Image (cartoon, grey):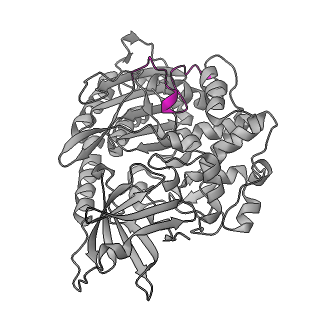
């Protein structure tokens, strides 16, 4: 589509002289945002668009919290979650520029205590391996050490990595893993002599001009109340649900920012590391490394049909795909009740950031696609409706499949006392099963939100119903008993992998009676 209307941004008339800018129309962007929010029931959203080094759109819509009704603005802070990963990669790029490390340095050279289950991977794991999801660990493996809100320190996490059995061979398979980015953040700390949080804020956010952004929710200025609360659709209504923006994720997902300041980050990326003040944050040479695919991912038939996608890969903290013949670089991020999306078309000097306080990621994708459609003059499509149809259909099917089926050969359980005791997993720690008021209870001792009731399913199998149902993480627990009818082990897995977030990685626990 071709558009001639000039775009007004934050009530300031901007001269849209470049081709990319001239094809954008404020009214159409705003309409797409409002349509998406209404269709996906999103309380608040903030969107910024940069083109040819200029911020051509930066606005907030809706409310930060359904109850308080305070408005979302371009300055409203959201948890950007896994969009933090690109900052951690850039921090390491800066240290490479300074000659303090190399991408191919072994991790054990900077973290001597670093150990993985596999000795070869321990010896050969490099900085670039940490950042490209090719460690051999599985999707979200070990995330229960940081999700949701645990008391584990970085030292605890790194010490426990050696107990996570790999799901694939080293460097063979793409599998998204947060713990490697937590480890990467600790490399930043060891090499720089500053905590990851201080390095991000002092060496990156401050020079970038990102004055309100912080490397953790607890670090937001006390007098700044302009931050969003997440919302979860549950039982037919939206429910405010506060979490601390994944502060435990550190280098994997802890940053809080707003679209006004994320625009500075996007423009720095599109300008090969040169910031708005003319100074260099990281070199173009290092950006080439960050935007170089280090591991390939399969391209679906649907992606090829929709965008002519020929390849999909992951660089260093960035997803990289082919998009209608252009290189598209970006990332998504998710928290309970809050999601974010960053998308860049470097060849067009065009970038979009969308932040929202509801967890319908499709709502953000629809907005981004509508903007890219304008910029690239693609065939006119209603992305909001197209994505909504797929989103709600998949959601309905997922919830329909989430109910555990009836057991044909039902077997009764032993008295509850037989299942009680303290179980231990080598990487997570203690999980307590106890009898209270005649009911079996489970307590993940390092995670305050993971407390719940065991409801009998059949035989020695139970379903865990968490005290906080909006976690949407019901899980099976299967006890194995020895000949003395004492628990010898227990395994867990989500009742529904479609509904439950992959970071609830119960499947990776190997629970044994604590000695």
- Vertical comparison of 236 with 224: above or below: below
Spot occupied by residue 338 in the image (x, y as percentages of width and height): 37, 39
Q: Residue at x 34, y 19 (%)?
A: 5
Which residue is at the front of the view, 28 or 432?
A: 432
Specify whether 202 is left or right of 30: right
Q: Which residue is drawn at 24% across and 30% down?
A: 66
Specify whether 132 is left or right of 387: right
Q: Which residue is drawn at 50% across and 61% down?
A: 430
Say which quadrant the N terminus sits in. Answer: top left
Instruction: Give the extent of the magenta segment.
Output: 208-226
Spot occupied by residue 489 in the image (x, y as percentages of width and height): 47, 76
Per the image, is 499 magenta? Answer: no
Residue occupying the far bottom of the picture: 483
Spot occupied by residue 127 in the image (x, y as percentages of width and height): 71, 49
Residue 62 visible: yes
Say which quadrant the C terminus sits in. Answer: bottom right
Residue 381 visible: no
Which residue is at the front of the view, 505 or 345?
A: 505
Residue occupying the far right of the picture: 99
Residue occupying the far top of the picture: 12
Specify whether 234 is left or right of 55: left
């Amino acid at each position: 589509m071709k558009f001639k209307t000039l775009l007004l941004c934050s009530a300031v008339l901007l001269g849209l002289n470049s081709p990319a800018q001239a094809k954008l129309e404020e009214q159409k962007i705003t309409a797409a945002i409002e349509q998406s929010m209404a269709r996906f029931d999103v309380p608040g959203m903030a969107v910024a668009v940069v083109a040819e080094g200029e911020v051509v759109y930066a606005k907030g819509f809706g409310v930060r919290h359904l109850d308080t009704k305070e408005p979302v603005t371009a300055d409203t802070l959201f948890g950007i979650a896994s969009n933090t990963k690109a900052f951690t990669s850039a921090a390491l790029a800066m240290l490479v520029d300074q000659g303090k490390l190399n991408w191919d340095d072994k991790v054990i050279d900077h973290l001597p205590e670093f150990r993985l289950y596999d000795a070869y991977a321990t010896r050969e794991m490099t900085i670039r391996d940490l950042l490209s999801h090719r460690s051999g660990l599985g999707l979200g493996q070990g995330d229960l050490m940081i999700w949701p809100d645990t008391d584990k320190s970085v030292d605890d996490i790194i010490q426990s990595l050696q107990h996570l059995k790999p799901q694939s061979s080293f460097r063979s398979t793409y599998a998204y893993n947060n713990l490697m980015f937590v480890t990467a953040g600790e490399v930043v700390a060891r090499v720089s002599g500053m905590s990851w949080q201080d390095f991000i804020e002092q060496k990156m956010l401050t020079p970038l001009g990102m004055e309100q952004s912080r490397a953790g929710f607890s670090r937001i200025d006390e007098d700044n109340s302009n931050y969003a609360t997440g919302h979860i659709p549950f039982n037919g209504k939206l429910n405010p649900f506060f979490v601390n923006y994944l502060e435990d994720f550190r280098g994997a997902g802890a940053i809080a920012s707003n679209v006004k300041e994320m625009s500075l980050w996007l423009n720095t990326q599109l300008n090969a590391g040169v910031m708005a003040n003319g100074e260099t944050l990281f070199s173009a040479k290092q950006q080439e490394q960050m935007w170089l695919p280090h591991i390939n991912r399969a391209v679906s038939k649907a992606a090829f049909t929709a965008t002519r996608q020929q390849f999909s890969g992951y660089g260093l903290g960035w997803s990289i795909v082919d998009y209608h013949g252009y290189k598209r670089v970006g990332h998504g991020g998710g928290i309970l009740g809050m999601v974010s999306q960053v998308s860049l078309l470097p060849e067009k000097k065009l970038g979009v950031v969308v932040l929202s306080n509801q967890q319908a990621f499709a709502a953000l994708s629809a907005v981004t696609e509508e903007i890219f459609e304008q910029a690239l003059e693609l065939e006119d499509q209603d992305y909001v409706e197209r994505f909504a149809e797929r989103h709600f259909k998949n959601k309905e099917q997922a919830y329909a499949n989430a109910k555990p089926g009836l057991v044909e050969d039902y077997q009764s359980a032993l008295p509850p006392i037989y299942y009680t005791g303290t179980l231990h997993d080598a990487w997570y720690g203690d999980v307590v099963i106890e009898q209270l008021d005649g009911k079996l209870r489970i307590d993940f001792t390092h995670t305050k939100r993971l407390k719940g009731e065991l409801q009998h399913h059949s035989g020695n199998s139970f379903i865990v119903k968490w005290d906080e149902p909006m976690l949407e993480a019901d899980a099976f627990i299967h006890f194995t008993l020895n000949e003395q009818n004492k628990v010898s082990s227990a395994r867990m897995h989500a009742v529904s992998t479609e509904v439950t977030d992959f970071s609830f990685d119960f499947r990776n626990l190997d629970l044994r009676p604590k000695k």
